[in-house]
Image (cartoon, helix red, strand yellow):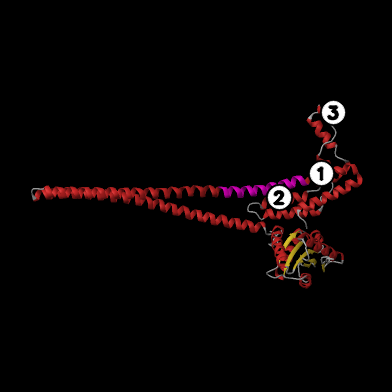
Amino acid sequence: MASIVDVVCLHLEQVEIEISKSNPEQAKKGFLGGLFSRSSKEPSKLDEQQSEDEYSKGDETSLSTEQAVLLNEAVPQDIKDSLQHLIEQLASMDGYSEIADLLKKEVKSITQIIQLAKILEMITNAFVEISDQEHIQFEKFLKTLNTRIKRVNTFISDTLDYSKTAATDSKQLNTSLNTNFSGMKDSLTNSKSLEDATSVVFSHLDQMTEQLDQYCETQQKNSEQLVQQMDKLSEQLRATEDEASRLKDDLAEQRVRAQTDPLTNLPNRYSYNERLTQEYNRWRRYRNSLTLVIADIDLFKQVNDVHGHAFGDKVLKEIASFLSAGVRESDFIARFGGEEFIILLPETSIVDATRAMNKIRLGVSKLEITHQNTLVPVTLSFGLSEFDNDDTTKAVFERADQALYRAKEKGRNRVCCLRAKAEE
């Protein structure tokens, strides 16, 4: 199944075709152009004097009858399915399961094309809100980190000042001690008695002791302040490391969730596009075999209609689990959308891939999936194509899609392949 954008665009193209059949002149402008553009005629003075309400009314009546009918027609199931798949991605986000449930109900209640605008706006707002919250969380972390970096700079600056002060104090102490020693020497030389000499020595020793005590007290005080700042800084750095680690884990988890289908836990379409680019570049470089497979659950809409969507989800999970177990570790499988799965088989020719997919197809047909004690048969159809010549990813996908269509035409529950045309 294509994305919601592809589905809506395809439907609008079909609308264009229907309009062109019934009203060629209107079709020249295109459906959306005719719907949202005003008349190309120059407005008369009377038109300019119309009130805003009258002008709006004139716009509404300018829609062709065909456009009005098409806007009120039923919403195709493909569009509803794509919307539901998008909402499933939203449901996997923390705190958005209830909103997703409400959106699912809204989608189910849609009956007309014109109602799509409202539901798409609601879904878009939800994803924008998630993006804003993540941005706020990251911005908050950056602000905290910036504050702590400033504290580190302050600590480094204080440490440098302490070092300079300590050097100055040490030099000053050395000068004072030398002065005292010189004074004591001179005093002893000039002393006339032992009593005078003793008094002079004790006086100088008291001064030197006081200077040493003052120096040691200052250094001890500065050292204690430095240790306290270092302890606080270490604690803050540990907290920053924890927050950075937590943020890193959150970002990794968000990336996994963004690339994972919430229902089947398989990689989703976004992840497939990323892996496809990698495998395609590798194929172009080394030219080893690479086969693309599209698998589709047969009559899945009938399964949903008869047994309910809850059972349909169960079938999707069972099939996803079986497919995952049936491919190699080097292979890649993703839920492409709705009931479609896509598989990339590196180092695998189309012959070997056909053999492998037939084995999986037979296994799926033997799965015992029950609903209310009743066995519900489920089968898969496969379309395969191998990269060849100067293939693009789009060309190979289209061939695989055509092969899948052929498998459906031939009665389903089969594997069909389509090779690239041989170069002339």
Rendered image quadrant of residue 378: bottom right
Q: Residues within 10 Å of mark 1 (few under 14, many from 20)?
A: few
Q: Residues within 10 Å of mark 2 (few under 14, many from 20)?
A: few
Q: Along the line of sight, which residue is nearer the eye, 298 or 332?
A: 332
Q: Is residue 17 left or right of residue 325?
A: right
Q: Which residue is mark 3?
A: 44
Disc 2 residue type (three-letter): Leu
SS at circle 3 = loop
Gap between marks 2 and 3 measured at Cα: 48 Å
Where residue 102 is drawn, which disc sits there?
2
User: In this picture, is 63 found above or below 324?
Assistant: above
Q: Which residue is mark 1?
A: 32
Disc 3 residue type (three-letter): Ser
Instruction: Estimate the x, y position of residue 43 in percent, counting from the top left.
Output: 83, 30
Q: Is residue 277 left or right of residue 306?
A: left
**Residue 126 on the magenta segment:** yes
Q: Residue farthest to the left?
A: 193
Residue 221 in view here: no
Q: Is residue 199 left or right of residue 369?
A: left
The nearer-to-camera label among 2 and 3 is 3
Task: Give the main secondary structure, helix, strand or loop, of the magenta stretch.
Answer: helix
Q: Residues within 10 Å of mark 3 (few under 14, many from 20)?
A: few
Identify the residue shown where x is 74% and y is 54%.
Answer: 84
Query: What residue range appears in magenta?
Result: 116-139
Q: How many marks?
A: 3
Q: Earlier in the sequence, mark 3 or mark 1?
A: 1
SS at circle 2 = helix
Residue 12 in view here: yes
Disc 1 residue type (three-letter): Leu
Instruction: Estimate the x, y position of residue 229 in percent, counting from the top left.
Output: 40, 50
Q: Is residue 131 left or right of residue 9?
A: left
